[in-house]
Amino acid sequence: MPLEIVTIPCLSDNYAFLAHDAQSGATALIDAPEAGPILAELEARGWALSHVLLTHHHWDHVDGLPGILEKHPAKVIGAAADAHRLPPLDQQVSDGENFEIAGEPVQVMDVSGHTLGHVAYYIPQSAAVFTADSLMALGCGRLFEGTPEQMWRSLSKLAALPDDTLVCSGHEYTQSNAKFAVTVDPTNTALQQRVVDIDRARASGQPTVPSKLGLEKATNPFLRAEDPAILAHLGMEGADPVAVFAEIRGRKDNF
Ligand code: ZN
Ligand code: FE
């Protein structure tokens, strides 16, 4: 049975997620930006945390953890490659490894680029992937530690998942991402429609995260470094996708 996924807004623009199994009561938290809203959501639903899955070491993804563990002594899971700078882990995991939540396999994917050792958690039976600051709605994380080549490889792995996969990413940056996306992909009608939908959602205070992978592949410029219209617009026909991705990421950094 697919896990129930709940989105929790935290801090000014972060998202944490709960993945809950109604039968066993197992509940995983993905990232811990801030204790207050996460504890309130658990309390309102009467759920107890069994697992915490950390994606990367940045403070806005881990700082809520101590306050959460005080009330919910859950098993904390994170990347072995990042264990030295993550909060203390009960289980260290690596790329390609699987573990289980309520009998559902969770696949660990290294998605380095934003940081080295950033992981995503893919739950195939629930058609959901938790990507934090790797693949984001209409965007991708800034390259603080990795190279364009690493991020392109990470995004390509995520793009290979089924189109109906729910992309649960870490921030509400979608509206500003949209303003940039149309500057590199101005003739994309699916993108234009998405911009309308995003503006409407934000005007009524609705989150734009999570999103479907199929929509990201059709509209997110950071997944589209091989798209002929984008290549033509950038004057980069025939260029290597890593170079095109690097160009798009560079433009976004200066946007
Ligand atoms: Zn981050
Ligand atoms: Fe972040």
Image (cartoon, rainbow, N blue to C red):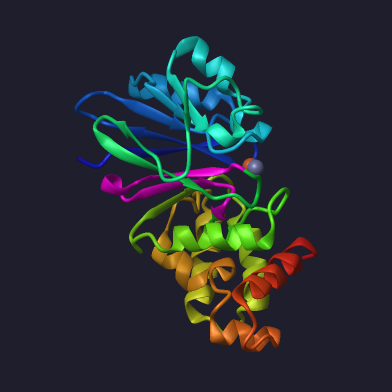
State which region is magenta: 117-135
Q: Position of residue 248 (x, y in %)?
A: 68, 70
**Does the stretch in magenta take in 220?**
no
Q: For the C terminus, give its image quadrant.
A: bottom right
Q: For the N terminus, give its image quadrant.
A: top left
Q: Position of residue 119 (x, y in %)?
A: 52, 43
Left or right: 71, with 175 as reference point? left
Q: Is residue 101 visible?
A: yes
Q: Residue at x 64, y 63 (%)?
A: 149
Q: Residue at x 51, y 31 (%)?
A: 78
**Does the stretch in magenta take in 124?**
yes
Left or right: 223, with 145 as reference point? left
Q: Nearer the viewer, residue 83 or 50?
A: 83
Single out the residue that lies furthest toward the right: 254
Q: Nearer the viewer, residue 134 or 150?
A: 150
Q: Nearer the viewer, residue 33 or 250?
A: 250
Q: To which quarter of the image does residue 115 belong?
A: top right
Q: Residue at x 52, y 22 (%)?
A: 89
Compared to residue 101, the image places residue 234 above or below, namely: below
